[in-house]
Image (cartoon, rainbow, N blue to C red):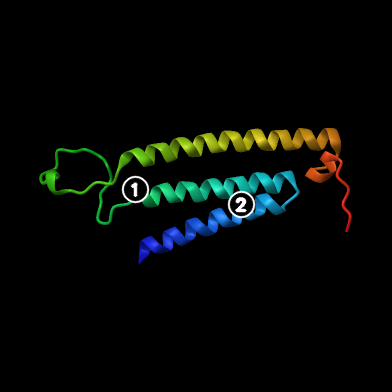
Amino acid sequence: MGNYFLYVTVVLLIFIGVTALLYKKNLIKIVIALNIVESGLNLFFLTLAYRPGGTAPIFTLAPGLEELKMVLPTPQALILTNIVIGFATSALMLTLAIMTYRNNKTLDIQKLRGVEDHD
C-alpha cells in the first residue's frame, strides 16, 4: 500500500510540473515547474530502487551479512548526482531570468516573443 502512495505522489508531482510548464508565462514560475518535475523523477527512481525490509548499502563485517537484504546503491548515487546537476541548472536558469529582466524589464515569455494577447 505504501508503494502505491509513492507512485501516486510521483504522478502528481510530474503532472503539476508539466501543467505549470504549459500554462505559466513567467520565467521564474517555469524554473520552479522544472524543479517540481525533477523532484518527481527523483522520487520515481528512488521508488523503483526501494526494497521492503532493506538496509543501507554499507558493507560491514557484521555477522549474518549474507541474510541481509540491501537496497540498490546505484540509483541513490545517480539521484544524488541528479540533484547536484539540477541545482546547477536551476541557478543558471534563474541567472538568465534575472539578466532577461534587467534587459527587457519583463519576465513574461509572450512579451519577450512579441506576441500580443487577444482576449
Q: Is residue 1 above or below residue 83?
A: below
Q: Nearer the viewer, mark 2 or mark 1?
A: 2
**To which quarter of the image does residue 52 belong?**
bottom left
Per the image, the residue denoted by label 2 is 18
The residue at the point 14 percent across, 44 percent down is 65
Q: Is residue 65 left or right of residue 110?
A: left
- Residue sticking out furthest to the front: 118
Q: Is residue 113 left or right of residue 24?
A: right
Label number found at residue 103? none
Dot 1, how many residues are within 10 Å of its Cα: few (below 14), some (14-19), or many (20+)?
some
The residue at the point 75 percent across, 36 percent down is 98
Mark 2 to mark 1 CA distance (whole Å): 24 Å
The residue at the point 56 percent across, 37 percent down is 87
- Residue 8, horizontal then vertical, whole percent: 47, 61
**To which quarter of the image does residue 61 belong?**
top left
The residue under label 1 is which amino acid type? Ala
Q: Is residue 9 left or right of residue 77?
A: right
- Residue 113, horizontal then vertical, whole percent: 82, 39
Quadrant of the drawing holding the N terminus:
bottom left
- Residue 85, horizontal then vertical, whole percent: 52, 34
The residue at the point 46 percent across, 46 percent down is 42
Give the mark, 2 or 1, whose residue is nearer the N terminus: 2
Per the image, the residue denoted by label 1 is 49
The residue under label 2 is which amino acid type? Val
- Residue 37, horizontal then vertical, whole percent: 56, 48
Q: Is residue 114 left or right of residue 86?
A: right
The residue closer to the viewer here, 75 or 116, is 116
